[in-house]
Image (cartoon, helix red, strand yellow):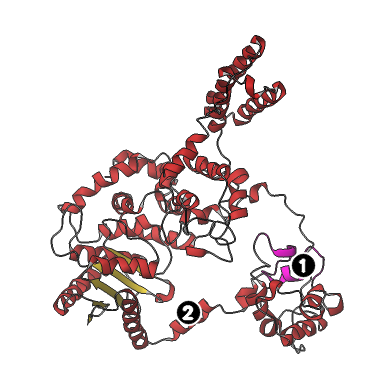
Amino acid sequence: MRFILTLLISAVCFCAPAVPVTAALPPEVRKELSDLSSELRPIIGMVRKKEIDEAKAIIQKVEDRIKELAIAEDEKDRSFTSLQLALAKSKNLIPVSFEAEVAPIIKGKCLGCHGEQRSSANLRLDTYAYMGRGSQSGALLLPRNPQRSLIMARLTVDGAARMPKGGEKLSDDEIGIIGRWIAGGAAFDGADVTSMIGDSLAEKKPEKPPVKVVMADGTETVSFKDHVAPWMVNVCLGCHSGNNPRGGFNITTFEQLLAGGDTGNTVVPGDPNGSYIVDLVLRQDPIKMPAGNQTQIKRSEAQALEKWIKEGAHFDGTDPKATLRSLVPTEAEIEAAKLAAMSDTEFADRRKEQAAAHWKRVAPREETASATTENLYVYGSVPQSRLDEIGVWGEELVSSLASKYKLPAGQKPWRGRLIVFVAKARFDYEEFNTVLMNRRTPRGVSGHSVVTGNFNESYIAMYDVGDTESVDSLNAKQLLGSLLAQAYLSRSGAALPDWLEQGFGLLESGAGAESLYIKSLPQKAGEALSTVTNPATLFDNGTFAPEEVGPVGYLLTKFLMTRGGVGKLSLFAQEMQTNRNAGRAVQATYGQSAAIVGQAFLQSGGR
């Protein structure tokens, strides 16, 4: 962290190398240097007034004049170094443009591992919206706080943890740009947070003329959907999709496939000899595609492509504007179909198998026991009597949740039950985070919930903290209630903000207003809330550190309950599951912008 601070301050503190002064500047030059320093003084006010272009013009004028003066090294006296100091401070006042300055660095150095096709550690950086979601290690950045931002730590640390992984370290200038952008608030200056970063400044290519799609009539011997699309999706789509497809050839949809790439009509219906794609995958020696030959296209597949083109390149799908991937079931879709076809008994058996498999990875030497209730499969290393007790508590808590937050008739909260892992030692609980989640366990966190789409994974993991609560910890029953509430809220499998899950969990934990822990939350949240400069960011993931999310989330969730009760909070959660944009969800649910609602929360003092 000391390096980061040094880096950020370096833009402000200019230290000229110590050189012996052996020649004196003429008086008229020293006066001009003094005058140039004076010209820089209004810049701080201009920046406050958002007169950025005017401020940049002054800085450029001063830099140009310094070059024209061509002052020799042995003439650089105090008047020169004072001007350099003033110039560095002025330049540091200029806001860093995300699109123009930060995005090119990220696109050039980071998207190979954190883009659309590959998202290592569940982190994507190809859009500003994805950056805000962070990764499995937590929030990527904390606006105005580069020292505590994960991205800065990963860019500057030495060893295997440094990013880019396996690549050359970013230059000091590049790291400084990112650090100053975060220190300035990490603002987005593009047109759309969901667009490719830097897209607002990219030169737009002229649109290609519409292509003519001929639908299949049943006379074809080769089916695009069955014989061509599967290998195109699995072999070619990685390079030929997204905002910057290789060779300008995008095959995301059937229409784009026919539109061709930079070389022209890659597919010419009825003319395989004139179709460049056939030459690439079938006729060149050696075969050029796929690039690098990581996965070979079978000769039979290339010949099927040739014949499909010869027969007119007809489309036997339903919508040529839909993605090719929609024609080919993914592994996730195949798994979802498999899960949907499973009976309740099969799903329950699956949970038992998952519980044993997960525990074996986490604590293979610990003996385990289990307890089964209507909605829960309690599994862990604590005594059987304790597991039975936790099972009874759990059913009471689930019943309370279901009475307040109704489910459709006949529907259970979780298919195949929810696994409740209970560890007798904190170390074993921390292993759940380390081994299964690949993340550290923040101090004071003793449990978490995981519910994925289609109930593929459905469990909570907790450390048995005992039956006595304190200002620093809920008791075991309250902790269980908090985690069950989180799992209940997120049972759709859609990602919700951490503050909402944890805040809702604490609100429904069963710990009353007189709880020592609940009483301590306003004070714990106070310091974190005091750093918020933009109320709208309260609702975004990554605004607060992991240890701050629970206390802040509790106060924020409680506040939202006062503005519409259970009904509005449920609608807000549904909105988040639909579009995953906190600002739009707040606007749609509460009829006011996130900034207005956030400001009202801050003014209320969290009450």
Element carrying mark 2: helix
Q: Which residue is label 2 attached to?
A: 336
Locate residue 392: give its quadrant.
bottom left
Q: Is residue 382 left or right of residue 532?
A: left
Residue at the spot 33% in from the left edge and 86% down from the top edge: 349
Locate residue 206: give its quadrant.
bottom right
Main secondary structure type of the part rendered in magenta:
loop
Q: Is residue 165 left or right of residue 577?
A: right
Residue 551, position in %: x, y? 28, 51
| In-front residue for pair 401/539 | 539
Q: Is residue 514 left or right of residue 93?
A: left
Residue 585, position in %: x, y? 44, 54
Is 55 covered by the magenta stretch?
A: no
User: Split into 4 quadrants, where in the image is the N terminus?
Assistant: top left
Q: Which residue is label 1 attached to?
A: 259
Label 2 crowd (10 A; few <14 / some 14-19 / many >=20): some
Q: Is residue 484 visible?
A: no
Q: Is residue 476 left or right of residue 418?
A: left
Task: Work out whether 117 lies above or below 106.
Answer: below
Task: Work out whether 339 lies above or below 433.
Answer: below
Which of the numbered marks, if any, corresponds to residue 361? none
| In-front residue for pair 326/424 | 424
User: Which stretch did the figure color magenta?
Assistant: 243-266
| In-front residue for pair 227/362 | 362
Residue at the spot 60% in from the left edge and 75% down from the top edge: 326
* CA separation in Å, label 1 and label 2: 33 Å
Which amino acid is tagged 2? Ala
